Image: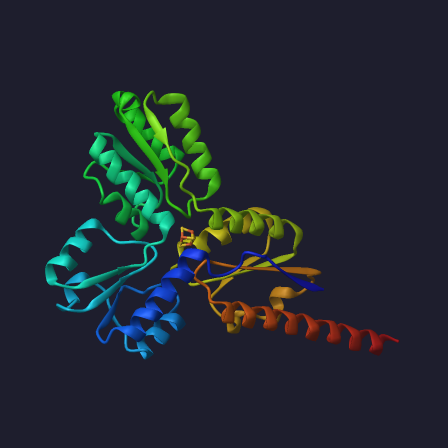
Amino acid sequence: MQVMMAESAGFCYGVKRAVDMARETAKKCRHSVMLGSIIHNANVVAELEALGMRKVDSWDQVRPGETVVIRSHGERKEVFERLAAIGATCVNATCPNVLRIQQLVAQAQEEGRTPLIIGEMHHPEVLGAASWSERSVILPGPRELENWLNEEPSRRNMPLTATAQTTCVQGIWESSKEILKKQCTNAKIFDTICNATHRRQTEAAELAAQVDVMVVVGDRKSANTKHLAEICREKCGRVVQIERAGELSSELFEGCLVAGLTAGASTPAGIIKEVYTTMSEEIKNMESNEESFEELLE
Ligand code: F3S
């Protein structure tokens, strides 16, 4: 049995950039703060705290003069305004792909268009991007889009600017675009799914189709890890989502010839390596058990 790992498993460009910016800020500034977890990973958050960075859950816990790192998901427009009013300095580590959606929404607001975001209603990236216009509409997928258009047929002629959450499942976005193209007369459509996400999802689906068991590593709160696991479940009957190697059990690999491994965008390389090593060891143990059983039969 062998372990196959997806090439794009782990930190994406945007997360790596945000973590690097946070580390640099923690080292340079005496009073640094992260607003929420910089990424969905407790180890990275603990490392930054050890460097002296304070973690707060809300902008109103920030003190004047502190330097605040904004995570890769971005923040609501109001938060930037509040922080400036408090007298805090912002280090904006919003991923450039997320920034693009915020800019498209802001531009739609200026042009009198209605920004439409296909994404998770309560996801911080989506709420952040939506805040750049008071007209923003968030819809999770094609079914809700269809309902929204049917509720008020005049919406089909509205000037719309449509974008997708960067980690939106490609299929959901494609079906939503189909509806917009067929039914709406004035919709500007922007493909804003991040390439890293798209590549990761495609690779995960391809790998899941070839293996007997698929392991997806990432924080349970991470939306992109959850999506990865969903995509893998469509292709493979045995999929587990774990946070750490310690959650793996040998029963999981029983009767398997090939095991696959992928990881969400906020999973550090060290954790992926740990999982890969544990999987390889489990497999080696199983093989040596099988060999000794065969020797017994001889
Ligand atoms: Fe950015 Fe894509 Fe990562 S949007 S944070 S590069 S998953």
Task: Please name whichever residue, 266 or 169, is drawn nearer the observer in this view of the structure.
Answer: 266
Task: Please name whichever residue, 137 or 51, is drawn nearer the observer in this view of the structure.
Answer: 51
Which of the image's four quarters has the C terminus? bottom right
Image coordinates for residue 46, horizontal then vertical, percent: 35, 75
Outermost residue toward the left?
85
Residue 7 found in image quarter: bottom right
Image coordinates for residue 265, horizontal then vertical, percent: 45, 58
Which of the image's four quarters has the N terminus? bottom right
Instruction: Tally the marks.
Output: 0
Measured along the vertical axis of the image, is residue 14 above or below residue 61? Answer: above
Regarding residue 109, the answer to whether it shows in the image is yes
Regarding residue 123, the answer to whether it shows in the image is no
Image coordinates for residue 297, horizontal then vertical, percent: 85, 75
Outermost residue toward the right?
298
Name which residue lies at 62% across and 70% down: 250
Task: Please name whichever residue, 25 or 137, is drawn nearer the observer in this view of the structure.
Answer: 25
Image coordinates for residue 81, horizontal then vertical, percent: 15, 53
Residue 70 found in image quarter: bottom left
Name which residue lies at 19% across and 55% down: 80
Residue 181 found in image quarter: top left
Measured along the vertical axis of the image, is residue 287 above or below residue 139? Answer: below
